[in-house]
Structures are given as structure tokens and as C-alpha cells.
Amino acid sequence: MSGLELIAAVLGVIAVWLTVKQNAWCWPIGLVMVLIYGWLFYEVKLYSGMLLQLAYALLQLYGWWQWKRPGHAEDARQVSRLQRPALLTGLATGVLLSAALGAAMANWTDAALPWLDASLTGFSLVAQWWMAQKRLQCWPLWVAVDIIYVGQYLHQQLYFTAGFFVVLTVIALRGWLEWHRDPALVQP
């Protein structure tokens, strides 16, 4: 399984790096990565993480559409900041998703780390939604989530994936800086 895990991690680094560079190829490469990770997480009983990968697959398609807007290049997303109400709504959504999924996983499955995995899943969905919409705040949320994921994957002995998330943390910091400096950044 570690060979497949390594392939997924490498694809993930490429996809996130392309995201930082605002290259739409991040989405199809990310789609392949999340499908591989969905299988891997099923194998190690990180069911919330597995479901997250399925949601990511849909969000990869949504993000690709948002960034490209075929036939309507003028409507393609530009980097922008969330205003405070939208930011708080997104974070509250993360809390609610985390609580609902954590309760389901703790009560109805044999999931490893049901509450932690569910919480990371809830906030990852919010970060991914914001990323698909090119919201600057996706990056600091990714930094926080990625750091916690490192510990979870070390605990599950998914060493390539833990290393991948260390790299993702560094790339997320870079993304935050690059998108913040983007001359096209739309101010609220």
C-alpha cells in the first residue's frame, strides 16, 4: 500500500503547487489523487477521511469549472477575501459538519479516531470550498488543518501521507503569501 500512498502524495504536492500558481491543471491532477486516497483511507478505517475524498472529487470538478468557466473567461474566479459574515458562516459550518460526522462515526462505525478525523474532514471541506472559489482565507485554514493531519497520519502509520502533509503545510504558507500579493486580489 505504501507505493500507492507515495503516488497519491506526489500527485497531491503537484496539485497543490499548481493551485498556488493558479494553474487549473491542479483540479484534474487533484481528482486522481483524491480517488487514490479515498481507497487508502478506507483500508485504514479513516472513514471520515474516505468520505472527504469523495466530497473532494466533486469539489475538484466544481473548482475546475469555477476556475475555467468554459466560454466565459471574463467570469473566471479572481482571488478575493471573504467578508467577516461569510468567514464566520464557513467556520460554523465546519463545526457543525465535524460534530455531526464525529457522532455518526463514533456511534455507527469502527472508525479509528472518529472525532479527530471528522473534525479535520469538516474543516477541510470548508477550506476546499473556499479554495475552489479562490478565497484567500482558504490558506490559513489549510495550514491549521494540515498541521493536525500530520499527527493523525503519524498515529495511523501513514508515513508518506504525514510527510506529504508537512509539505502541504509549507505550500499552503506559500499559497497564502502568493495569493495575498496577487495584483488581481479583489478587496471586499
Image: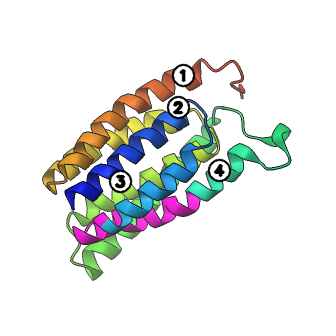
Name the residue beneath numbered marker 1.
178
Q: Residues within 10 Å of mark 4 (few under 14, many from 20)?
A: some
From mark 4 to mark 1, how far is it between C-alphas? 20 Å
Residue 20 is marked as 2
Q: Which residue is mark 3?
A: 120
Among numbered discs 3 and 4, the one appearing first in the sequence: 4
**Quarter that holds the N terminus:** bottom left
Residue bearing the label numbered 4: 64
Mark 2 vs 1: CB contact within 8 A: yes
Indicate the position of residue 155 as horizontal and vertical percent values: 14, 53
Q: Give me the C-alpha separation between circle 3 and circle 4.
A: 23 Å
Residue 42: within the magenta?
A: yes
Indicate which disc, 2 or 3, sits on the residue closer to the N terminus.
2
The kind of residue on which mark 2 rests is Val
* Amino acid on which the number 3 mark rests in the picture: Leu
Which is more foreground, mark 3 or mark 1? 1
Residue at position x 14%, y 54% in the image: 157
Residue type at tag 4: Trp
